[in-house]
Amino acid sequence: MGAAQDGQRPGDRQAHGDQRRDLSAEIGEQLFLSEATVKTHVTRVLSKLGVRDRVQAVVLAYESGLVEPGEAPA
């Protein structure tokens, strides 16, 4: 089993996709929104921030000082 060109093993992308779906579903349940609505809002926020995914949004939060290492989530 060789690594893909992006350094991920086959199946890693699927696992990450499953995690995103689970997170969107969890957020939707807590806010009484559909998973599709959560995904739409996340996509729009990422677009406004000029980032391509949630990981880049986290990096941006740290780089901008919005979040500091070791800080407990709100």
Image: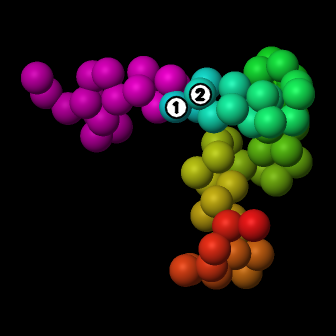
- Residue at 41 percent of width and 26 percent of height: 15
Q: Amino acid at mark 2?
A: Asp
User: Residue 54: where, in percent of width, then height?
Assistant: 64, 46
Residue 20 visible here: yes
From the viewer's perspective, tell me whether residue 7 is left or right of residue 73.
Answer: left
Residue at 88%, 25% in the rendered image:
33
Q: In percent of the image, x 75 and y 36: which residue is there?
A: 27
Q: Quadrant of residue 28?
A: top right
Q: Which quarter of the rendered picture does the N terminus lie within?
A: top left
Query: Label 2, on which residue?
Result: 22
Reading the image, the residue beneath label 1 is 19
Q: Is residue 17 magenta?
A: yes
For the magenta stretch, what is the residue range? 1-18
41 horizontally vs 9: left or right: right
Residue 2 lies left or right of residue 9; in this view the side is left
Vertically, is 47 above or below 62? Answer: above
Q: Which of these two is toward me, 31 or 48?
A: 31
Q: Main secondary structure of the magenta part?
A: loop
| Residue 20 in the image, given as x and y percentages of width and height | 59, 31
Secondary structure beneath label 1: helix
On the rendered image, what quadrant is the C terminus found in?
bottom right
